[in-house]
Image (cartoon, rainbow, N blue to C red):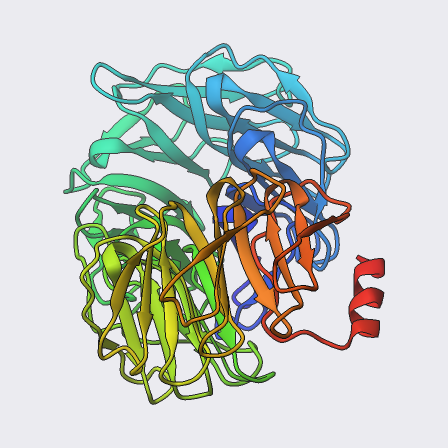
Amino acid sequence: MDANTGTVVGENGTIVRTTDGGNSWTIQASGTTQTLWAVSFTDANHGTAVGEAGTIVGTTDEGDHWVTQPSGTTFQLRGVSFSDANNGAAVGDSGTILRTTDGGNSWVPQSSGTGNTLFGISFIDTNTATAVGGACGIGGESTIVRTTDGGNTWTTQANPGTVCLFKVSFTDGNTGTAVGDGGVILRTTNGGDSWSPQTSGTTKTLYGVSFTDTNNGTISGFALGGTGIILRTTDGGNNWVEQTNYSLPQGASAFYAVSFTDANTGTIVGDAGIVLQTTDGGTQWNSQPTVTFNYLYGVSFTDSNTGTAVGYENPDGMILRTTDGGNSWVRQNSGIGDPFAGLNFFGVHFVNSNVGTLVGQEGIILRTTDGGNNWVQQTTDTTDWLYAVHFSDENHGTAVGFLEGKILTTTDGGQNWATQTSQATGLLGVYFTDTNTGTVVGNDGVILRTTDGGQSWTPQTSGTTNQLRAVWFADTNTGSVVSDQGTILRTTDGGQTWVSQTSGVSEILLGVPLRMPPMEQRLDNWAQS
């Protein structure tokens, strides 16, 4: 909205907000886990985000609270634009256009006249808007539709494009720019009665465009398997100049969206948590600190301040470390990488603030003894995808595999790992209360128990065929397992009997806390939630 205030949306309902020009970003609760594709604010308070499965969420208080709004559709919504706090429209798959005149309290479908996907929309005032999209792929076509009566009628405009158009930016009722596949840039100065191609100098996909006035505009884009691109014009697109003065987070390459608040101040976002900001019209782009938008699969805290989270990243996997209770996270280097597909780290466990182990795809095991400043890869004889790991002390640990059901044990801190066959597949959780006594859980309600450090494993009766996701024990006898469909299993006799408990939910439960608060506090927390 201005040089300091901005909002970014993304995967799994991610919404992050800055009020200091991107120096810091705060995660906001969106109330959805659907991917959000676009966001539009008309002032600091009023904003709307749209995404998968017809998801629309709105805020009237700067994003402190996001409220789900009824869209009446399950189509993916790709773009949204508001001219003021009340009047706006969302566009999406199959030519979907939804219109609101009451700030999103109600959304009314409108006839776009096309069945092609609409990716972007730009509202100039209450009545005037342009939406763009197309049929993507070989033999495709560009689509541009225009309204001058608030969407009561949408008119298809002729244009010379044959590729998908992804975004459009108008600075007044007449002057606009649309961008799309293959480096396409289209420009109109007569409200879309005619569109003229401009020379971009690239064949990369152009996915974002932002103009602050008739002359000053910026485009962002990417190439699959290649690098991102930033183009800048100061003469209305007669000349587009590529900007290259920026550095990216490791594994980042694609720019998806751009927004400028004035001729000098702008922000670009993209994959791998990219946030680039300029205050000089793009002469210099500076990377801003933010959280990752990629999947995080595992986390381990040793005290209230010190924790490590792991997940997916290209090329070297994601490792994040906090020493202030999660107020800030620092990216750590795994020391290994796959530049073609990236790496998945699924599980992590620290026995103290310095000594920890993480596990991941294709038998990856990494060990640190200095709080993650350095990670050393350990050797195993399996390529199974390891989903969980747990150590009872610095030397004795166990990891479990998902694809082949392998169980790996070590008695020397991972210098040597012995592989055991469990006669089960899809193992997802492991917990040991001492060097000898441990439990493993997984697919089809499988629970396995050892009392000899993993030399032998005994099946236990869970009473369910659900996928068991995680396990935790308070002592040798007392433990809990969580799984799909809100399942919670409880034992007080070391797993000889497991009793189903009522969770009150039907969702997938993914984890059990490794450090539990007192029972009175747990009961109070559960009652409140």
Q: Judge left or right: residue 517 versus residue 158.
A: right
Outermost top residue: 113
Of residue 150 and residue 202, the one placed in the foreground of this image is 202
Is 84 displayed left or right of 203 in the figure?
right
Q: Is residue 506 left or right of residue 366?
A: right
Quarter containing the N terminus: bottom right
313 in relation to 394, above or below: above
Q: Quadrant of the C terminus?
A: bottom right
Residue situated in front as seen by the camera: 216 or 525: 525
Residue closer to the observer: 148 or 132 = 132
Q: Is residue 247 visible?
A: no
- Tell me where residue 441 appears, x and y as whole percent: 50, 53
Residue 49 in percent (x, y) is at 59, 43
Q: Give the percent coordinates (x, y) of residue 118.
A: 45, 25
Name which residue lies at 36% across and 52% down. 422
Residue shown at 25%/21% (left/top)?
Answer: 137
- Residue 150 visible in the displayed image: yes
Vertical arrangement, residue 32 with respect to residue 378, above or below: above
Q: Which of 247 and 304 is in front in this view?
A: 304
Q: Whole-percent x and y of residue 332?
A: 33, 76
528 displayed left or right of 379:
right
